[in-house]
Image (spheres, grey):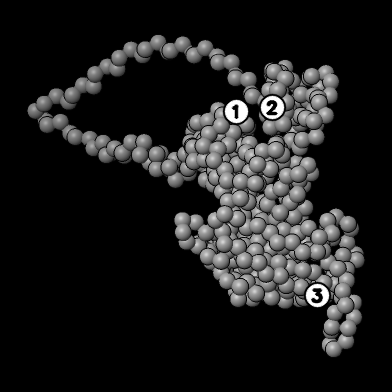
């Protein structure tokens, strides 16, 4: 059971996507675990074959509990070599002495009658795949999933199938909740993590205002000939600028654990995503400092969609190295975030507003955004934080270099 956040102590395994004997490779989704943050898709980090499932469905186990046993390719190769019999020496014929008669080979024993074939084994019925939301609804109403016909991909049983089996729409309160999400539990987890953060982390806060007129003009040119679903948003530029600045200033990119700071070589930017109904999650955009802007934008759209539907991958929720949050679309001009432990920094972006600004000695209207930094004083100080914010601002003023 992977640790999917500093506040996670246990998780419930609600779906297996593999069975013993299946071949898997690094990055495959093998199971779904329910936590206070929703339904998390568990990825595997080895290539090999599933030997044994150790945890059954709907079982809650502590973090660190083995869920399954896998035989890696290296182990399989070593086992095959150990099982192979040593090569036998070639037979060398030996001539009998002249004074002795040649030995007569004994006659072979009569062949034993062939063993009767084993009785045919009826194939086991394949267990249908069931979404976490459908499984929960069936459990609430004591519905046997074997009596439900699936209409999802590969005949998987989805929420609507269980609804149809009930014969009537479920209660409105149940329908409001996104699949895989328990917003009350998520709110409890958020409160626990933020209380710990404010209790243990000595925060300091900085603000920096940046002229982003160049970014807006560059985006307008780039997006002019693109369809709506292929356009870049200024949010992608903000995330990219934070990622590049974090790569240059590693004191803001990493984890504070066991009394010391562990800088991260990779830059995985956590994106704070509001979930309808009151939840919040900050899954990671991996290697945000390296992928092209168009790919980063596509990943952002996919991440927001999956997070709001309650389907986040374990690597996305467990390894952000720095977080970006924004309430600009809600009209907020300045916000100061709370660091999510064990991270050491969070950058905030407000709404882009038009303000009078001095450019080349003349005052004119410019697009300005407020950028804030909340950072861990055990790892960095205000001087380093100011340089970090200035680097973000410089990058936003040179969008063609992002």
Residue wearing tag 3: 211
Q: What separation in Å lies between label 3 and label 2 (alpha carbons)? A: 51 Å
- Give me the residue at 85% from left, 79% from top: 357
Local secondary structure at mark 2: helix
Residue wearing tag 2: 135
Q: Are marks 2 and 1 in contact (CB under 8 Å)?
A: yes
Q: Nearer the viewer, residue 253 or 43?
A: 253
Q: Are marks 3 and 2 in contact (CB under 8 Å)?
A: no
- Give me the residue at 53% from left, 66% from top: 379
Q: Position of residue 236 (x, y in %)?
A: 76, 62
Categorize mark 3 by other alpha carbons within 10 Å: few (<14), some (14-19), many (20+): many
Give the answer, above or below, for where 313 lies relative to 266. above
Q: Position of residue 277 (x, y in %)?
A: 78, 42
Left or right: where 274 falls relative to 247: right
The answer, for residue 306, to whether it is visible in the render is no
Local secondary structure at mark 3: strand
Give the answer, above or below, for where 124 lies relative to 89. above
Q: Position of residue 301 (x, y in %)?
A: 77, 52
Q: Nearer the viewer, residue 76 or 6?
A: 6
Q: What separation in Å lies between label 1 and label 3 (alpha carbons)? A: 52 Å
Give the foreground label among 1 and 3.
Answer: 3
Left or right: where 207 falls relative to 72: right
Residue wearing tag 1: 58
Give the answer, above or below, for where 85 lies relative to 328. above
Q: Quadrant of residue 284?
A: bottom right
Q: Which mark is residue 9?
A: none
- Give me the residue at 90% from left, 80% from top: 364
Categorize mark 2 by other alpha carbons within 10 Å: few (<14), some (14-19), many (20+): many
């Amino acid at each position: 059971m992977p640790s999917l956040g500093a506040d996670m102590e246990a998780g419930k395994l609600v779906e297996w996507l593999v069975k013993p004997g299946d071949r898997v490779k690094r990055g495959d989704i093998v199971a779904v675990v329910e936590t206070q943050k929703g339904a998390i898709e568990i990825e595997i980090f080895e290539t090999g074959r599933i030997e044994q499932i150790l945890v059954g469905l709907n079982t809650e186990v502590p973090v660190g509990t083995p869920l399954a046993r896998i035989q890696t390719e290296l182990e399989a190769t070593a086992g095959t070599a150990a099982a192979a019999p040593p090569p036998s020496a070639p037979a060398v014929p030996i001539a009998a002495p002249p004074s002795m008669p040649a030995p007569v080979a004994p006659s072979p024993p009569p062949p034993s009658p062939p063993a009767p074939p084993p009785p045919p084994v009826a194939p086991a019925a394949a267990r249908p795949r069931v979404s976490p939301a459908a499984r929960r609804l069936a459990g609430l109403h004591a519905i046997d999933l074997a009596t439900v016909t699936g209409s999802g991909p590969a005949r998987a049983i989805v929420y609507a199938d269980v609804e149809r089996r009930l014969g009537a729409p479920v209660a409105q309160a149940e329908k409001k909740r996104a699949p895989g999400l328990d917003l009350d539990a998520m709110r409890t987890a958020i409160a626990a993590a933020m209380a710990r953060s404010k209790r243990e982390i000595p925060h300091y806060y900085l603000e920096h205002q940046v002229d982003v007129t160049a970014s807006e003009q560059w985006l307008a040119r780039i997006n002019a000939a693109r369809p709506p679903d292929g356009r870049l948003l200024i949010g992608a530029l903000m995330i990219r600028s934070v990622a590049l600045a974090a790569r240059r200033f590693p004191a803001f990119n990493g984890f504070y654990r066991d009394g010391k700071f562990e800088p991260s070589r990779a830059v995985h930017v956590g994106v704070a995503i509001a979930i309808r109904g009151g939840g919040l999650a900050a899954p990671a955009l991996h290697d945000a400092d390296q992928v092209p802007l168009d790919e980063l934008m596509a990943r952002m759209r996919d991440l927001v969609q999956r997070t709001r539907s309650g389907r986040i991958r374990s690597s996305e929720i467990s390894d952000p190295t720095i977080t970006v949050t924004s309430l600009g679309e809600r009209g907020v001009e300045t916000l100061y975030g709370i660091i999510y432990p064990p991270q050491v920094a969070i950058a905030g972006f407000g709404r882009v507003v038009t303000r009078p600004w001095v450019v080349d000695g003349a005052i004119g209207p410019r697009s300005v955004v407020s950028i804030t930094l909340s950072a861990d004083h055990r790892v960095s100080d205000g001087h380093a934080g100011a340089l970090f914010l200035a680097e973000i601002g410089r990058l936003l003023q040179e969008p063609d270099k992002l």
